[in-house]
Image (cartoon, helix red, strand yellow):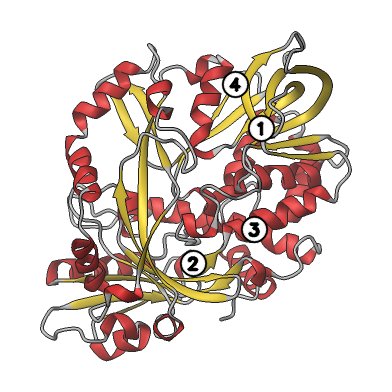
């Protein structure tokens, strides 16, 4: 009897697991910093960017906290806390700098292949919400990262900014909005393809699609043996790696658990699915040119903030409204219903049960969203588009998001929104968990991986990093002149003048 397991001597300096924007970004950074390193990228599907990085599986917002109200909470004394908004914006500026470098270096021929200027807006109704938005604008408008943000309650001005949203709207309800021109729409799927195409042109890079990583074990040298199954033949191979990055979206948690590293103990995942209403009618899309974010309803998770977005995909404009949250036990859109049950371990079950106990409102909200009728979804859309007709919009399923659950000394376990990098003590493995702002901050997140896992290389790499990312090692908010220079440079190179 022949075995379907083939042992090989294949070995890489770096193995990237997952075919999304995170692996592609880290691969591009490392190839530019260390061209002689060998890199293997393993993706389980037939092409890259088919899960959360796919253009229609996310909202494509270049998350810079220009319009997302959950990044600017109100303090007990009525003041607005902008610290998280500043941090998110700083992170996106790092991504913008790297993308501009790639354009100038000829790695990306045209930024319009993946990036378009789209104004970002916040939109609320009711006197109390309008007062909050005014105070938010006052707190942000003089910050160098938010220069140019405008506020208005004038219906005529709002109609100019968002004609489709104002069309057919009943007079009488107080409305307020902010508008800023420096927002973007990002096709992360197209960006992933561009980065992977660059990598495939470099020596020492292997792209293995249709290959699923099934296990990771330490080897005697302190590196890893990666067990990979070729889905077309059923054969498995064992690949050596000095460093492994697990960037498999929702599929990262089960693989992180298989590493056995102590840092993975106690971590669980809470999957949240999403749906959007999509409109590709060019006449309707032509009447809206913005990403308009509202306020989340009580009990809704931060990633469920309703928004009406202009999307530009393959040169065609469309509209996206949502998200409508839901629940599935899958960790990936093309995953298994057994993903969540299989992720439960003795070391994380306590934290997961505590989160279930403490988040009954969230659970109730998700169940309500799952049970929502098409009429209810249309009613939510009409808060933003009063003239919306059901026949112009279709329901699409977005990518899965797996939120991080961690142990907590007081509560037993906490549910975290955002992204988190988990690394092994010796720096030989790293995994990315979580969701939004996710892809928008792929570059700073991957720089975190580099800092944590390649600290010994940083002194040698730092000049190149500063060439690629002028603000590397500091904050733009603390350096107004550099902030202005970076904004002008990236706006020009990325063709974001509008």
Mark 2 vs mark 3: in front: 3
Side of 234 where 498 appears, left or right: left
Which label's residue is closer to the chain start, 4 or 3?
3
SS at mark 3 in the image: helix
Choose mark 1 or mark 4, whichever is in front: 1
Secondary structure type for disc 4: loop
Q: Which residue is mark 4?
A: 424
Q: Quadrant of residue 140?
A: bottom left
Q: Earlier in the sequence, mark 2 or mark 4?
A: 2
* SS class, disc 1: loop
Q: Identify the residue at horizontal 39%, vertical 51% (top origin).
A: 83
Q: Secondary structure at mark 2?
A: helix
For the residues labelled 1 and 4, the Cα–Cα distance comes to 29 Å
Asked if labels 4 and 2 touch by Cβ distance under 8 angstroms, the answer is: no
State left or right for residue 488 relative to residue 466.
left
Mark 2 to mark 4 CA distance (whole Å): 37 Å
Asked if residue 421 shows in the view, the reply is no
**Disc 1 to disc 3, how far (Cα)?**
26 Å
Percent position (x, y) of residue 392? 34, 76
Residue drawn at x 78%, y 60% as measured from the top left? 107
Q: Is residue 105 above or below residue 148?
A: above
For marks 2 and 3, the one nearer the N-term is 2
**Which residue is label 1 attached to?**
231
| Residue situated in front as seen by the camera: 451 or 115 | 115
The mark that comes first in sequence, 2 or 1, is: 2
| Picture residue at 65% right of the left edge, 72% below the top | 112
The quarter in which the N terminus is drawn is: top right
Looking at the rendered image, the disc whose residue lies closer to the viewer, 2 or 4, is 4
Which residue is identified by label 3?
191
Local crowd size for mark 4, using a 10 Å CA cut-off: few (<14), some (14–19), many (≥20): some
The residue beneath circle 2 is: 144
């Amino acid at each position: 009897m022949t075995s379907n397991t083939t042992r090989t001597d294949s070995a890489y300096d770096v193995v990237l697991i997952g075919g999304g924007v995170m692996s592609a970004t880290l691969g591009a950074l490392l190839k530019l910093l260390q061209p002689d390193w060998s890199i293997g990228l393993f993706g389980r599907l037939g092409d890259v960017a088919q899960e959360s990085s796919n253009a229609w599986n996310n909202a494509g917002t270049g998350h810079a906290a220009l319009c997302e109200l959950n990044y600017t909470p109100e303090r007990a004394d009525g003041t607005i806390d902008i610290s998280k908004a500043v941090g998110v914006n700083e992170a996106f500026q790092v991504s913008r700098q790297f993308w501009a470098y790639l354009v100038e270096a000829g790695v990306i021929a045209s930024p319009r292949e993946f990036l378009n200027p789209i104004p970002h807006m916040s939109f609320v109704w009711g006197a109390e919400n309008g007062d909050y938005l005014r105070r938010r604008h006052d707190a942000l408008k003089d910050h160098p990262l938010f220069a140019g943000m405008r506020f208005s309650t004038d219906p005529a001005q709002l109609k100019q900014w968002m004609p489709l949203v104002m069309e057919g709207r009943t007079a009488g309800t107080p409305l307020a909005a902010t508008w800023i021109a420096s927002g973007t729409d990002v096709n992360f799927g197209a960006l992933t393809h561009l980065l992977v195409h660059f990598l495939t042109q470099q020596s020492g890079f292997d792209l293995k699609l249709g290959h699923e990583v099934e296990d990771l074990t330490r080897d005697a040298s302190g590196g890893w043996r990666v067990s990979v199954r070729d889905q077309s033949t059923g054969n498995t191979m064992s690949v050596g790696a000095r460093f492994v990055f697990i960037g498999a979206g929702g599929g990262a948690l089960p693989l992180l658990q298989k590493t056995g590293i102590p840092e993975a103990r106690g971590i669980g995942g809470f999957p949240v699915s999403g749906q959007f209403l999509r409109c590709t009618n060019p006449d309707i899309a032509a009447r809206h040119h913005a990403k308009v974010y509202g306020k989340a309803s009580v009990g809704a998770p931060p990633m469920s903030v309703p928004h009406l977005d202009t999307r530009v995909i393959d040169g065609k404009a469309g509209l996206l409204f949502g998200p409508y949250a839901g629940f599935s036990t899958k960790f990936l859109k093309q995953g298994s219903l057994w993903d969540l049950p299989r992720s439960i371990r003795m070391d994380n079950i306590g934290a997961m049960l505590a989160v279930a106990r403490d988040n009954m409102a969230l659970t109730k909200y998700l169940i309500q969203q799952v049970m929502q009728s098409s009429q209810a979804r249309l009613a939510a859309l009409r808060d933003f588009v009063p003239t919306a007709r059901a026949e112009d919009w279709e329901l699409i399923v977005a990518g899965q998001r797996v939120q991080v659950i961690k142990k907590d000394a007081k509560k037993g376990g906490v549910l975290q929104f955002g992204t988190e990098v988990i690394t092994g003590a010796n720096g030989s493995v790293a995994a990315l968990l979580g969701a939004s702002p996710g892809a928008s901050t792929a570059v700073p997140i991957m720089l975190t991986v580099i800092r944590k896992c390649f600290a010994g290389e940083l002194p040698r790499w730092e000049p190149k990093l500063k060439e690629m990312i002028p603000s590397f090692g500091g904050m733009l908010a603390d350096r107004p002149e550099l902030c202005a220079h970076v904004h002008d440079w990236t706006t020009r190179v990325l063709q974001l003048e509008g």
